[in-house]
Amino acid sequence: MLRLRDIHKTRGAGSQRYSLSIPRLDLAPGQQIAVVGPSGCGKSTLLDLLALVLSPDASGEFSVDLDGGRFDIAALWRGHQHDALARLRRKACGYVLQTGGLLEFLDVRGNIELPRRLLQLPMDSRVEQLAAHLEITEYLGKRPNKLSVGQRQRVSIARALAHAPRLVLADEPTASLDPANAQRVMQLLVQQAQVSGTCTVIATHDEPLVRNAGLAVLPIHWQRDADGGVTATLGEWR
């Protein structure tokens, strides 16, 4: 579904430089993986590249298969085809942020329905089904500020899955939760992604948590360079 070869991204310069290298990454439909590394190693940068919100500086290949067609993402970035990238992003991706990223002026139902409305998809029973599976049915009429952190994260997961995306990205989705809630939210995210046949990439520093949830692990290795900057490299499966 996604194929990346020799992708590079650099931010800053000198001692403030951060460089990420992705020698190879292949993602298949339904695959569940975790990208593991400490804070500041580049996990969020990797997710932003996969979410098509951050352009690579250099790329050997960056392509996405969707609806029977193959899209050359690297060429779209080079050609400044931002509208095409936005269409692909809206249709293909769901994103679970560390803090939920919910809109406070919408109730829970409105937040979950939002990606379907943006794509002009019918309001079918999917919202109710996700709410039931994620144990948030009783909160559909409430505003996000009335929910606990764990409940907000479950709403965020439902919103990310509501439009049946091919790829769901989650950036430290359990970092703000206590261990018991973290385990529950992680299990619910993985289970619902599996039911939907969605490829899932979760960025986290908590390797035991994602291994207990049955995810394969991709480490990010990093080193401090002579100029004081950091170079990080996406590793092999382990």
Image (tube, rainbow, N blue to C red):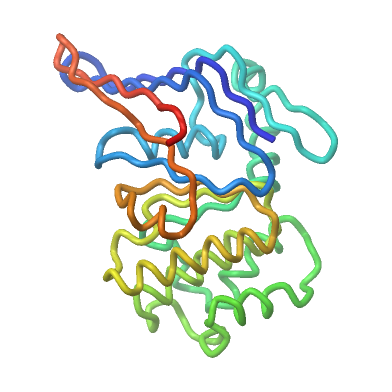
29, above or below 186, in the image: above
Taking the image as shown, residue 108 lies to the left or right of residue 44, namely right
Q: Is residue 84 left or right of residue 175?
A: right
Foreground of the two, 111 or 175: 175
Q: Residue furthest bottom?
A: 138
Q: Residue at x 52, y 52 (%)?
A: 95
Residue drawn at (16%, 10%), measured in percent from left and top?
A: 227
Q: Quadrant of residue 42?
A: top left
- Please identify the quadrant where the N terminus is shown: top right
Question: Outermost residue, right direction?
Answer: 68
Residue at x 68%, y 52% (from the top left corner): 165
Q: Residue 155: percent from the left, percent from the top?
A: 51, 71
Up-down relation of residue 61 to residue 50 (above or below)? above
Q: Between residues 165 and 34, which one lies in front from this camera angle?
A: 34
- Which residue is pictured at 51% across the width and 45% down the height? 33
**In the rendered view, does 139 fall on the left or right side of 179?**
right
Determine the image quadrant of residue 59.
Answer: top right
| Rendered location of residue 137, percent (x, y) | 57, 86
Residue 10, how many percent across, how many down? 36, 19
Q: Which quarter of the rendering shows the C terminus?
A: top left
Where residue 19 appears, as percent x and y from the top left, is 33, 20
Q: Nearer the viewer, residue 120 or 47?
A: 47
Q: Quadrant of residue 208?
A: bottom left
